Image (cartoon, rainbow, N blue to C red):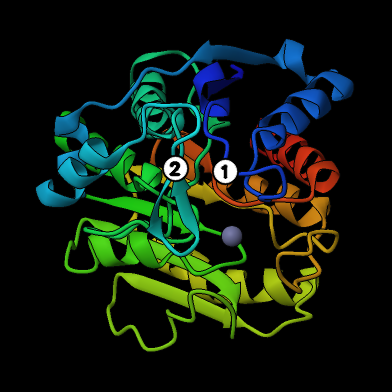
């Protein structure tokens, strides 16, 4: 069994500016490290397909989706702002549709193909996008689109979403807050953008705010203590992952001190949980990670952990 990696060249069409950290070179950096590691021969690489309107409407308000489509620039020199951090240029809508659609392809892959684990190397990221708003570089909530599709298509009643991006996955929490079919586990630096996740009261939301400077052993201990018993009790039929690597010590976007070792560890732990409860099924989707070298190395470590 190998891991299927979904991506698409259209994910590079979304370009904000020469200096914006959420840039096409992130995907290239991941590909470079996969090749350098020799791992490409252990992976099944496939092109993603785009999400359609019906897929988006399971997790987003119709007027929000319509607004994104209506306002999407079509000329090379055009741009619009959906929120103070989130710009759309001419290629953005197509990139966002392929990013959201990749998770749907990955869900189908782990339920119908031999491979039980998939990784979506896509952008723009998704976990800050709420029911009715873009936020923090995110337009459509990719992991939420895939989770809702999995519940719709395969009749799942219990999906665990694990989000280890250094920022709180506020959008994912917002979308599934009142849905008992989804267990949401998020660890994040606090205080830090978007400064949410410390007051959520729900049995299906396990938030772990941690201070700047948090290192690997501290993060692992918190995850082991808070997430794993909740996942054990929930017995998920699928594990989805918002895989953000901006908590790496070399990533300037925040002040966590995680390393590749930590991403390898969480992948191994999630794989063990998935094998216990859901025949090994994991779909992981790229979120943050802005330092190209550590991003590429971290994704490789994560993929090796899931093998
Ligand atoms: Zn992030």
Q: In the rendered image of this protein, does residue 289 appear above or below residue 105? A: below
Circle 1 residue:
16
Please state, as top left, top right, bottom left or bottom right, where the C terminus lies in the image: top right
Please state, as top left, top right, bottom left or bottom right, where the N terminus lies in the image: top right
Q: Is residue 139 left or right of residue 42?
A: left
Badge 1: residue crowd in 10 Å (few <14, some 14–19, many ≥20)? many
**x 73%, y 27%: residue:** 28
Counting from the top left corner in percent of width and height, residue 188 is at: 58, 72
Q: In the rendered image of this protein, does residue 23 appear above or below residue 269? A: above
Counting from the top left corner in percent of width and height, residue 294 is at: 82, 47
Residue 233 seen anywhere in this rendered image of the structure: no
Residue 45 location, quadrant: top right
Counting from the top left corner in percent of width and height, residue 259 is at: 82, 57
**x 29%, y 85%: residue:** 201
Counting from the top left corner in percent of width and height, residue 215 is at: 80, 74
* Circles 2, 1 touching at the beta carbon (< 8 Å): yes
Q: Is residue 231 left or right of residue 28?
A: left
Residue 40 location, quadrant: top right
Q: Secondary structure at mark 1?
A: loop
Q: Residue furthest left?
A: 62
Work out whether residue 239 or residue 28 is closer to the camera in this orientation and state it: 28
Residue 259 seen anywhere in this rendered image of the structure: yes
Q: Residue furthest front?
A: 77
Work out whether residue 108 or residue 49 is closer to the camera in this orientation and state it: 49
Circle 2 residue:
79
Q: Secondary structure at mark 2?
A: loop
């Amino acid at each position: 069994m190998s891991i299927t990696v979904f991506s698409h060249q259209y994910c590079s069409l979304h370009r904000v500016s020469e200096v914006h950290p959420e840039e096409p070179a992130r995907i290239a950096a991941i590909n470079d490290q996969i090749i350098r590691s020799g791992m490409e021969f252990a992976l099944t690489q496939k092109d993603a397909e785009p999400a359609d309107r019906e897929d988006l409407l399971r997790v987003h308000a119709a007027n929000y989706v319509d607004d994104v489509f209506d306002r999407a620039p079509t000329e090379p020199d055009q741009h619009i702002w959906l929120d103070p951090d989130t710009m759309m240029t001419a290629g953005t809508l197509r990139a966002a549709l392929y990013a959201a659609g990749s998770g749907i392809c990955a869900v189908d892959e782990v339920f119908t193909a031999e491979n039980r684990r998939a990784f979506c190397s896509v952008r723009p990221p998704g976990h800050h996008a709420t029911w009715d708003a873009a936020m923090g570089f995110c337009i459509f909530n990719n992991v939420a689109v895939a989770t809702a599709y999995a519940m719709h298509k395969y009749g799942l009643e219990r999906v665990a979403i694990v989000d280890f991006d250094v920022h709180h996955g506020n959008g994912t929490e917002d979308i599934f807050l009142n849905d008992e079919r989804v267990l949401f586990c998020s660890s994040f630096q606090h205080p830090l953008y978007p400064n949410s996740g410390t007051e959520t009261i729900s049995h299906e939301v396990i938030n772990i705010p941690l201070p700047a400077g948090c290192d690997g052993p501290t993060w692992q201990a918190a995850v082991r203590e808070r997430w794993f018993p909740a996942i054990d009790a929930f017995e998920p039929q699928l594990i989805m992952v918002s895989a953000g690597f901006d908590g790496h010590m070399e990533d300037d976007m925040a002040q966590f001190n995680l390393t590749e070792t930590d991403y390898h560890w969480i992948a191994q732990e999630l794989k063990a949980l998935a094998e216990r409860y859901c025949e090994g099924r994991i779909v992981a989707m790229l979120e943050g990670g802005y330092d190209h070298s550590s991003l590429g190395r971290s994704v490789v470590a994560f993929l090796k952990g899931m093998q």
